[in-house]
Image (cartoon, rainbow, N blue to C red):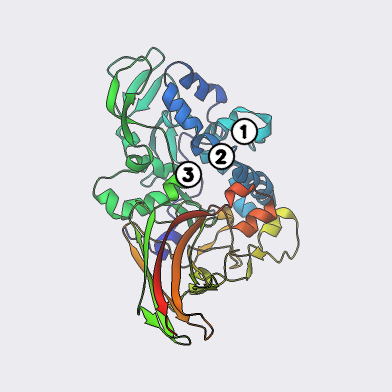
Amino acid sequence: MKLNKAFYLIILCPLVISAQSGLGSFSYEDFKTPKYCGSACHTDFYQQWKQAMMSQAYTHEWDEIEYFKLAVPHADKDEKVAEVKAGCNGCHSPIAYLAGDVPPPPPSKNSRANESVSCDVCHSISGFAGDIPYNYNYIMKPGKVKFSSRKPSVESPAHEIEVNSLLKSGDFCGICHNEKSPYGAWVKTTHLEWKEGPYSKEGVQCQDCHMPKAEMKTASMGAKYSDARLHLFHGAHDPGKIRGAIELRINPDINEVEPGNIVKFTVALFNQKTGHKFPTGSVEDRIVWLHVEAIDSKGNVYHIPVDKKGFEGEEFTIASDVLAYQDLGIALNIPDFKGVKRDGIPIGDRIFRMPYFDPQGRMTIQQWNTASLGVDYRIGPRETKIETFTFKVPANVPPGKLKVTATLNYQLLVKPVADFLGVPESESQIVKVNEHSTEITILQ
């Protein structure tokens, strides 16, 4: 299955899946709390989960702002996207969705919606509706039986265990890590990217990287296993996971150059770590960019913009100071909103992204308001991208060594958007993915 642009726009079925696990089909009381699971038996897993984004999918600051400040008021104004008022919680707080709590209380109210993606949610999923996992099309069966990837050597005193191979498959993750907008555009495709890529064909599952195996007990009264799955779920919000995801190297085409002449630098970027594209997930929010600068023997700094390749949509992959995200004005009641700066990074840097467009063709960070997608210029698994940077050496550059450094940076959320909406700085802090330097000699 080739994930080209046409595939992203195919409408396979409606946004809301009519399975047995629909809105309001259960109550909060049908699910045990995470604290219950972790208080006596699954203590290590509970502590790992508490530190993961799974436990913060509803309470995380940006998710709260995006839902209550943007999605909910937008849904109240536009019938086309009205379902996201409930649907966002299908993945961000499944028990709130299943309990029909729409919208749930804000995180400050400390309701059970704050449990986010809890232990009992994942271990109550028996399958998914249809052929493709996406848009919370889980089949939920809460109760005495908990689904697991293995049968333990010791019976649990708290519940029965039924082996379900789905929990060992990347397809399980796709239930929430694939998403279609109300307009039928694929706005999250992490699972589909993995499915199309080399790792799934080799039998490497999502869990192999995000739930690595280790020797430990899965429950306090149980036996120790050599291949227990840690409940780390570390990904886009974990700097340690991001760092080193892409290898890069820079080289010049000549080693010595006179002032006023031209030297071309080539950067190779190799995705040696992720089983999906980089960046992935909430691609409308993420920004990954390549910055190249030179420092001469006197400490003067020169920014070198990327060379254009000429492909369609390239303007969205080269940093500029244009305005975007005008559809934020809908939820915020700002008529004729002019937008904010699209990138907030040095002009001329290469950006690895896929732009999302609203029904009016404007770039958006609101996945629910995405009607179409632009060029997909992300780095695929085991893919190498080549970028060139042509530098005309200024006539007044002093002789000596010229050090040129290529740095790949990552932000969870475009900084101008974060600043405009009052999102905590942690969401727009720069994470250095990798860097590499080379040198040339400036002749007298």
Measure the C-alpha gap from mark 3 to mark 1.
30 Å
Name the mark nearer the viewer: 3 or 2.
3
Measure the C-alpha gap from mark 2 to mark 1.
9 Å
* Helix, strand or loop under label 1: loop
Residue 89 — which label?
2
Q: Is residue 168 visible?
A: yes
Q: Position of residue 131 (x, y in %)?
A: 35, 46
Give the mark nearer the N terminus: 3 vs 1.
1
How many numbered discs sit on the rendered protein? 3
Amino acid type, callout 3: Asp
Q: Position of residue 260 (x, y in %)?
A: 48, 87
**Whether residue 415 is situated above or below residue 212 in the rendered picture:** below
Q: Is residue 83 visible?
A: no
Quadrant for the N terminus, please: bottom left
Measure the C-alpha gap from mark 3 to mark 2.
23 Å
- Pointer 3: residues within 10 angstroms few (<14), some, or many (20+)? few
* Helix, strand or loop under label 3: loop
Which image quarter: residue 58?
top right
Amino acid type, callout 1: Asp
Could you say which is closer to the camera, residue 275 or residue 258?
A: 258
Amino acid type, callout 2: Asn
Q: Is residue 385 left or right of residue 374?
A: left
The residue at the point 63 percent across, 28 percent down is 111
The residue at the point 67 percent across, 58 percent down is 328
* Residue wearing tag 3: 238
